[in-house]
Structure formats: C-alpha cells, structure tokens
Amino acid sequence: MSTTTSSPVSEPALSAPAASSLAAPATVAVVKHGPYEDAQALFSGSLFVGITMMMYAQAGLLTGSTAGLAFVLHYATGWSFGAIYFAINIPFYWFAWKYVGKEFTIKTFVSVALLSLITELGPRLIHIDYLHPAFAAIAGGLLMGTGVLFLARHKSSLGGATIVSLYVQDKWGIPAGKVQMAIDCAVVALALWVVPLDRVLWSILAAVVMGIFLAVSHRPGRYHGK
C-alpha cells in the first residue's frame, strides 16, 4: 500500500521568492497500487480477519455482517464456518458488481475465498489453550478493523455489510465505520438465541472497537492510493 506525497516544509523565509514558494498549496501525487501490492494487501487483510475469527471461535464470540450470520449458523448446527460464510456472501456479489464495480467485486470474491480457506486450515496450524473474552473482543476488534482497512484501501472487502457500508459512504458521505458498527451490533444482538448473553455483550464490544477504529482511520480524502 503505497502513497507518494509532497508538501511544503516550514523553514525561515530567506527571500520573497522562497516565501512565495512556501505559501504555494501542497501537491499530491497519486500512485496506483500494483498487482504485488494488491496481492499482499488482500492476503494480509484476510489473514488478520482470519486470526480474529479463530480468536472469536475460541472465546465463544461472534461478529456482525455475513460473518456474524455464519457464526450463528455454525454455533447452532456445527457446520463449517468457512463453508457457510462463503455461501452466504454469494448474493452480495451481484450487488457489488452492479453498484460498486467489477474490480471491487473480483477482489472481494478473492478475499472471501481466502478468509474461508484460512478459517478452515488455521485451526490445524494454531491452537489457543486459553483466551479471555475481553482480550478477544478488544484485540480481535482492532485486528479485524486493520484487516478490513487493508482491503478497503485496495478496493476490496469481506462482503456482506461491508459492501453496503462502503457504498453508503461513497453515495451519501456517511462514514463506513458508523454504518458498519450499526449493522454489526444489530446482527450480534440477533444471536441472543444461540450465544450466552455475556458472550453477546463481549461481541458487541468487539464490534464497537472495530467500528471506532474504522471511523477514525477510514476517511474519504485521507488516503490517496488507488
């Protein structure tokens, strides 16, 4: 993820031309992401979120969006989280293709596939013996927020509500983090019939942590990479 910017540097005014130069508005050179940068970001973002999903599963937590629905079905039926998550996201690809764009849809499909694979293979590679739900909520919320931010800055997402959130931000200027937070909290609340109340409350904390992180970090105009 690379950006190139040039901005004036404050220093003593040595002459009139120098002062005039310093007063000139800053210029920003936009650097397009290359294939290697995109691949690195999609994998890293999916990996961060995959680690979060494994932490949540260990602590009995869940998240919002389609991943939250996949967790509810996983806890209720014992079916594979990765397979459920991949299947639930299929209808959202049509929405992304029509309203967000071809590149975004393809990258989102790749990210969802990667996350599904990571959550399937991850438990065979790493096992956590003890994890307090408070730590899982805070660390997981930050990890997931970072992963989602990586993907968003490279025109990708993890499907579901993230697609809708980014669309709403671009269309009406409502921060994606706030939209995501509202949707995620609503989905987590629906899990009360499957997940114990204390785990739902910890899950809501995780959603709030991630939403605040995205609201602060993902602002239109702050990042100039494409």
Image (cartoon, helix red, strand yellow):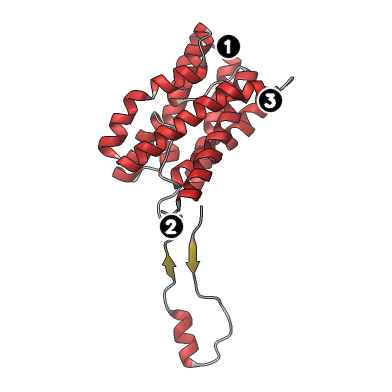
Point 47% across, 46% down: residue: 38
Q: Which residue is mark 2?
A: 224
Residues at marks 2 and 1, CA–CA distance in whole angstroms: 43 Å
Q: Viewed as shown, does residue 202 lie left or right of 155?
A: right
At label 1, counting other C-alpha atoms closer than 10 Å, the crowd grade (few under 14, some 14-19, many 20 or more) is few
CB within 8 Å, label 2 to label 3: no
Q: Percent from the top left, x then y, of residue 86?
A: 43, 22
Residues at marks 3 and 1, CA–CA distance in whole angstroms: 25 Å
Give the quadrant of residue 61.
Answer: top right
The amino acid type found where label 2 is placed reads: His
Q: Viewed as shown, does residue 131 lie left or right of 116?
A: right
Query: Can the viewer see residue 56 in this picture?
Result: yes
The amino acid type found where label 1 is placed reads: Pro
Q: Which residue is mark 1?
A: 196
Placement of 179 over or under 196, stated as above or below: below
Q: Viewed as shown, does residue 64 lie left or right of 12?
A: left
Query: Can the viewer see residue 189 in this picture?
Result: no
Residues at marks 2 and 3, CA–CA distance in whole angstroms: 36 Å
Placement of 181 over or under 149, stated as above or below: above
Give the SS element for disc 1. Answer: loop
The amino acid type found where label 3 is placed reads: Ile
Q: Which residue is mark 3?
A: 126
